[in-house]
Amino acid sequence: LDGLTPGFVQHPGTTLQILGAVIIRLMNGAVPFGQLVESVYKDPEFFLHGIYYGVLLMNVASLIVPGWYVLLKSGRLFLVFLVQSSALLITSWNLAGIAQGNIPVVANISAETLLIAITNIYGLLLLKLYFDRKEGREFSSRRLATAFGFLAAAGLVTKTIFLAWAVAPLFLIKGRK
């Protein structure tokens, strides 16, 4: 760094920090903890790239699965594109750099990029509630309720702006809430 300090430092948030720790552990397998810490200090960019690609993979999967589910349930391609349009809201894409083989800016590892995946998965659960209600089935799954609770907690811990999404199931579930 030649004695220069970084221009911007921000804590990524607890959710992303835990996910990053899991990804770093997966990248190193059964390496002893002391050796793992040493390798992270020696080559932090390698691990930042791993975390970036882990979050990117989550975002891609969280767009494909809801689109597939909507296509399966409705058979309408327009709705699939609508569900997957959240990817168009990402304004930090450097397509020219990516086309040249450059790795996107590692600073994109932020709570917001993780929140995209959490929101997409939460949206998938909301779609399940919607289609179940439309088909006459009522909400009764403890697993679905647990998934809603886990994702609502992860979303709220990541960014409090997720609160609007967290209350959405209350409008789709009939009866006692």
Image: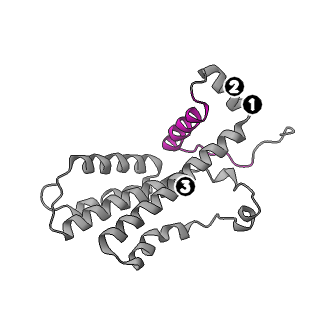
Q: What amino acid does circle 1 point to?
A: Lys
Q: CA distance from mark 3 to mark 1?
A: 26 Å
Q: CA distance from mark 1 to mark 2?
A: 6 Å
Give the x, y percent position of residue 85.
48, 71
Q: Decide if residue 23 is in sight here.
A: yes
Secondary structure at numbered mark 2 = helix
Secondary structure at numbered mark 3 = helix
Disc 3 designates what residue? 113
Q: What amino acid does circle 2 point to?
A: Glu
Give the x, y percent position of residue 72.
33, 68
Q: Nearer the viewer, residue 64 or 167?
A: 64
Q: Earlier in the sequence, mark 2 or mark 3?
A: 2
> Does the magenta segment cover residue 23?
yes
Badge 1 crowding class, 10 Å Cα cut-off, few under 14, some 14 to 19, many 20 or more, is few
Disc 1 designates what residue? 42
Task: Give the side of residue 96 with respect to residue 130, left or right.
Answer: right
Q: Residue furthest left?
A: 175
Q: Main secondary structure of the magenta part?
A: helix
Magenta segment: 7-29
Q: What amino acid does circle 3 point to?
A: Thr
